[in-house]
Image (cartoon, rainbow, N blue to C red):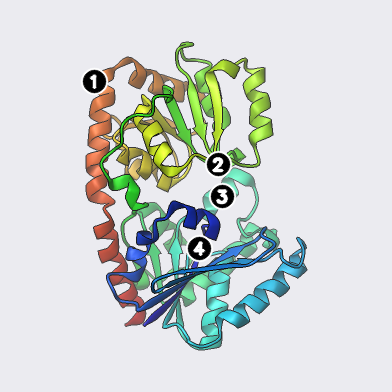
Amino acid sequence: MNLLYLHGSTLESYWRTGKVSYLDPIRAGGLFESVHMVNLAPDADHDAERSAGSVRFTSVGLARRGPGQLAKARTLREAVERLSEPPAPDLVLADDANLLGLTARWVAARLKVRYAVCIYYDNDLHHRLTGRPALGFLRSRRLECAFERWLLRGAAGVYAGNRGYRDYALRHGADAGRTYLGSWSVDDIFYADPPAPHPDAREILLVGRLHPLKFIDDVLAALTRLPGSARLDVAGEGPDRARLEGLVASLKLGPRVRLLGVVPREELLARMQGARAIVVTQGFSSVVEALLSGRPVVAYDHECNAEVVRDGRTGLLAPFRDAAALARALGRVLDDDGLARDLGQEGRRRMLDECAPSRSIDHRRRFFELCLA
């Protein structure tokens, strides 16, 4: 059997990690003979393609004809036509209930095969935070909800890696009998024995895109409440860099904050080991990766973080957007080496069990069997 997998990460960033073994959960222990991974890149102006063994990677640059929505729609239509050419997949899998889900249903209808959807985000949450639908061209959350119900009800299966995302899917029309609660896994490099600490690491580390929805402003505000010896590194790049640089300057935090940009994965792991605390504001994968580092994690009680950060046991939680509470939690970890050690050890121990790749592979296989039954 063959799988067509429409995924969310760009081909370039995916390939740069070198972690093709991440596909083991997708291949589900040999259930599929071949996997064609396709990335729909809204802002890319070119296509790209690579292959590794039985896996073919394609990136479709939707802005190849220009940035306008009509030009992108035309490019997407042509991509769907190409994806519908033989050999036909046995299942089309989409990484979200938005553009990828729409494309999956479109291709599946042309080929008369089934499609399935993975839920990795809560669009209700996105609307609360931004006031806009995640699928921007719809311009209405009510219309987007109708679209989600149409998409999720027609799916042969809906996969959720945690309870929060499962509940979101059920609220928006997914069939309970075809909605599978699995587990979450991240790139296998995070499960390896931790490397030696980076000699240039700082006391606090945040890993994430420089984007308003990462709430880095809150971490900077929390830093102003901590002693001057506490310094922050931010590993990541994004469109919010210039504004954040201005905010760092206005708060007079220049010597205490570094925006490192994109950091190679091996260096990032070492910087995690050198940090005395890792702070996570947004992103479930980010919090799982932070816990696997074995370092103490301070996170917002937001999204699905509380499913893995058990306050006082595997990490510390702070109320969402409460910079003062975030500062107090960071201060506890920085002031108490014993607490930091216990939280880090228990966090890694739990994640090695609950979010193990072997669990994810088993869950994925059962899910695909459900979809194809």
Residue drawn at (48%, 87%) of the image: 87
Q: Is residue 122 above or below residue 361?
A: above
How far apart marks 1 and 4 lie (CA) works out to: 41 Å
Counting residues from the start of the chain, the first of labels 2 and 3 encountered is 3
Check the picture and name the quadrant holding the C terminus. bottom left
What x and y, as percent, mark residue 50?
A: 51, 68
Q: Which residue is mark 4?
A: 96
Counting residues from the start of the chain, the first of labels 1 and 2 encountered is 2
What x and y, as percent, mark residue 278?
A: 40, 31
Give the amino acid at mark 2.
Arg
Dots 1, 3 in contact, CB < 8 A = no
Dots 1, 4 in contact, CB < 8 A = no
Say which of 77 and 325 sits in front. 77
Residue drawn at (31%, 36%) of the image: 195
41 horizontally vs 278: left or right: right
How far apart marks 2 and 4 lie (CA) works out to: 19 Å
Q: Nearer the viewer, mark 1 or mark 3?
A: 1
Check the picture and name the quadrant holding the N terminus. bottom left
How far apart marks 1 and 2 lie (CA) works out to: 31 Å
Disc number at residue 209? 2
Give the amino acid at mark 3.
His
Q: Which residue is mark 1?
A: 338
Dots 4, 3 in contact, CB < 8 A = no
Q: Is residue 1 above or below residue 149?
A: below
